Every structure is written in structure tokens, then in C-alpha cells.
Amino acid sequence: MRATVAYFTRGGRSERAAQALANELGERGVDVELVRLTPTRGTSLVGGALLAALRVPSGLTHTPDLNGVDLLGLVGPVWAGSITPAMRSMMDALHDIEGRPVVSIVCGLHACTGVAARVVKALHARNAGLVASRAVGRSVLKDPHAIKDLARELCAEALQSTRP
Ligand SMILES: Cc1cc2nc3c(=O)[nH]c(=O)nc-3n(C[C@H](O)[C@H](O)[C@H](O)COP(=O)(O)O)c2cc1C
């Protein structure tokens, strides 16, 4: 089984969550590729924040190829009450997820459940299968044990849909 975990980070917290998710999948025998999303526009903090506030995608230097991938992970921060411009570009590239399970981790200062719910809705609109989703705040993201527990829970949820 193959998985791609695509993430965007500026300060490193989402990267740690994405890495924990990839590690957890790997421990369960999944062949995982961890892909950092790099925006082509809005690369400065102010520029990125502006695009986020306007809900405009940034473009990506490289969009992960999901051919042959059985499970998708998406991890990134909340900016201006929404997903980042880079993650918006990633979502735009997902036209049809073809029933595959998705793990979504939305990282904010606080648990931004509304943003996470909108991501789940957008994923279902793109024909995702089971979506295991969490909105997490600083208290979880600064604690390596809590991140590991989160990754374990989300993997268990997402992988149950792939068992025969
Ligand atoms: C431009 C900008 C806007 C942000 N807006 C929000 C927000 O609306 N709500 C929130 O909870 N956190 C917000 N944050 C905080 C980040 O979502 C949070 O610190 C996140 O964990 C950072 O992830 P990272 O370390 O992977 O970049 C914002 C951060 C930045 C840089």
C-alpha cells in the first residue's frame, strides 16, 4: 500500500505533524512519500497572509503525483481563518480522489474546527473516501507525545476503510 503525505509549513509545526503521520503509516507497513508543498507566489509572510485572507491559491512548484497512491495525507496551518494558499492549490489539483481515504490535519493556534470541517466538505466534493480529520492547536502541536497519539488515531481511522 502506498501513501503520500503532502504538507505546507512555515514555522515547522505542521511539518512535525506530517512527519509523525508518515512515521505512523510507515510503522504499519505503508510505503509513504512525504512531500513539502512549495508555493510559487506569496512566499513572504505578508504576501502569503494576503493571499490567504483573499482565499487565493499560490500555485505550487511541484504538485504530488497521486497515481498508484492509496491514501492521501494533507497537513498544514490555518492562516487568516482558512487553509494556506499552498494547500488551496493542492486542493485545486485534486479533481477526483476516487474514493481513496484521506487524513487531514489542520494546525492552528487553537483547534480551528470550522476550517477542518470545510476541508472535509471540500474533500468529499472531490469524491474522497473515508476522511479522518482533526483540527489541532498549539497545546497538541508542541507535545511530541500528543502528536504521535494523534497520528496513531488518524491512521487507525483511515486504514480501517482499506481493510478487506
Ligand atoms: C499569516 C498567519 C496567519 C495565521 N492565522 C491564524 C488563524 O487565523 N487562526 C489560528 O488559529 N492560527 C493562525 N495562525 C497560526 C498558525 O496557524 C499556527 O501557528 C500553526 O501551527 C503554524 O504552523 P507551521 O508552524 O507549520 O507554519 C496564523 C499564522 C500565520 C503566519
Image (cartoon, grey):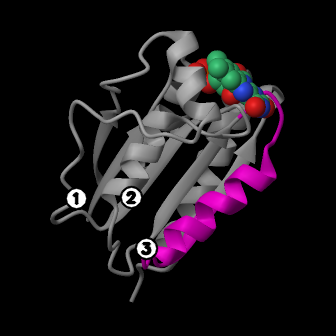
For residue 91, what is the image quadrant? bottom left
Distance between mark 2 and mark 3 Cα atoms: 13 Å
Distance between mark 1 and mark 2 Cα atoms: 8 Å
Q: Which residue is mark 3?
A: 126
Looking at the rendering, the stretch of residues picked out in magenta corresponds to 108-132
Residue type at tag 1: Leu
The residue under the point 51% across, 16% down is: 47
For the residues bearing labels 3 and 1, Cβ distance under 8 angstroms:
no
Distance between mark 3 and mark 1 Cα atoms: 14 Å
Q: Is residue 110 left or right of residue 56?
A: right
Return the x and y of residue 25 as percentages of the image width and height.
Answer: 42, 51
Q: Quadrant of ligand 1?
A: top right
Sort mark 3 into few (<14), some (14-19) or many (20+) by Cα contacts within 10 Å. some
Residue 69 versus residue 160 in the image, above or below: above
Q: Is residue 61 left or right of residue 8?
A: left
For residue 107, what is the image quadrant? top right
Can the viewer see residue 10? Answer: no
Residue 118 versus residue 115 in the image, above or below: below
Does ligand 1 reach within 8 Å of label 2's beta carbon?
Answer: no
Return the x and y of residue 32 as percentages of the image width and height.
Answer: 29, 47
The residue under the point 57% across, 42% down is: 55
For the residues bearing labels 1 and 2, Cβ distance under 8 angstroms:
yes
The residue under the point 38% across, 45% down is: 89
Q: Which residue is mark 1?
A: 66
Residue type at tag 3: Arg
Q: Which residue is mark 2?
A: 72
